[in-house]
Image (cartoon, rainbow, N blue to C red):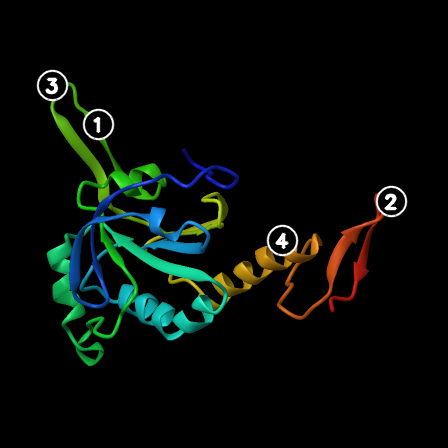
């Protein structure tokens, strides 16, 4: 599907670990209707860059929740793998202390629907199913609005960790636009001026109050 911005976020119902250790069998985004969602994908459990991202989102979780935003993580690992990693202390490379949901995209359908799977299946000349590339998720991030529509997406290659402050900035920009009807110029941050299109089509800076 490539670019999902402006489209309804693909739905799913899969196993997940919530509250740092409870496995559920039918986790979906439907429960968050009326809220914003930051849905982010990461490549693998028990790796190096991934725990830094997961902990970074946890450290700012209250900032997201104060903005009516739920954070949800997804990887292609199993729910048992997620659970095991959650029991491992941060000092040992684990993600103990993470409380937001971590979804198990074991069959890779969610990563495929959001077009972040870092590999693909194909049939060879003998009609045998083969896989090319790593069948894990890129570092995809999607901001979904209260109506279930994707409003922002970012996809990083496997070695490139994301900036959680930027995710919050984009949330602020979307909510500013929804509240004031003004647009956000380059490098906009909360508390800065927005822009409004004037009657002659020229964009003027207006102070935000």
Counting from the top left corner in percent of width and height, residue 160 is at 38, 59
Mark 1 crowdedness (10 Å alpha carbons): few <14, some 14-19, many ≥20: few
Question: Which circle's residue, 4 or 1, is located before the other in the chain?
Answer: 1
**Mark 4–mark 1 contact, CB under 8 Å?**
no
Mark 4 crowdedness (10 Å alpha carbons): few <14, some 14-19, many ≥20: few
Mark 3 crowdedness (10 Å alpha carbons): few <14, some 14-19, many ≥20: few
For the N terminus, the image quarter is top left
For the residues labelled 4 and 3, the Cα–Cα distance comes to: 54 Å
* Circle 4: element type: helix
Of residue 105 and residue 28, the one placed in the foreground of this image is 28
- Residue for point 41% across, 62% down: 162
Per the rendering, the mark at residue 16 is none
* Circle 3: element type: loop
- Determine whether, in the image, residue 187 is placed left or right of residue 97: right
Question: Which circle's residue, 2 or 3, is located before the other in the chain?
Answer: 3
Question: Which circle's residue, 2 or 1, is located before the other in the chain?
Answer: 1
Counting from the top left corner in percent of width and height, residue 195 is at 75, 56
Per the rendering, the mark at residue 122 is 1
Of residue 166 and residue 24, the one placed in the foreground of this image is 24
Image-quadrant location for residue 107: top left
For the residues labelled 2 and 4, the Cα–Cα distance comes to: 20 Å
Instruction: Answer above or below: position of 27 versus 3.
Output: below
- Determine whether, in the image, residue 32 is placed left or right of residue 193: left
For the residues labelled 2 and 3, the Cα–Cα distance comes to: 64 Å
Image-quadrant location for residue 126: top left
Per the rendering, the mark at residue 126 is 3
Q: Mark 4 points at which residue?
A: 178
Q: Name the residue under label 2.
A: 199
For the C terminus, the image quarter is bottom right
Q: Is residue 42 visible?
A: no
């Amino acid at each position: 599907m490539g670019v999902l911005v402006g489209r309804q976020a693909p739905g799913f119902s899969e196993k997940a670990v919530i509250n740092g250790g409870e496995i559920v069998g039918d986790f979906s985004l439907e429960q968050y209707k009326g809220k914003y969602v930051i849905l982010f994908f990461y490549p693998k459990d028990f790796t190096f860059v991934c725990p830094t991202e997961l902990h970074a989102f946890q450290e700012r979780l209250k900032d997201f929740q104060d903005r009516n935003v739920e954070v949800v993580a997804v990887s292609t690992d199993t729910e048992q793998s997620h659970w095991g990693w959650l029991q491992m202390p941060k000092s040992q490379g684990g993600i103990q202390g993470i409380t937001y949901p971590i979804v198990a995209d074991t069959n890779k359908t969610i990563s495929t629907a959001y077009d972040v799977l870092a590999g693909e299946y194909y049939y060879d000349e003998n009609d045998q199913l083969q896989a090319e590339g790593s069948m894990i998720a890129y570092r995809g991030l999607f901001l979904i609005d209260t109506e279930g529509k994707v409003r922002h997406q970012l996809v990083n290659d496997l070695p490139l960790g994301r900036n959680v402050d930027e995710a919050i900035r984009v949330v602020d920009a979307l909510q500013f636009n929804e509240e004031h009807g003004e647009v956000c110029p380059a490098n906009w941050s909360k508390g800065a001026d927005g822009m409004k299109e004037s009657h002659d089509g020229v964009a003027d800076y207006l102070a935000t109050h």
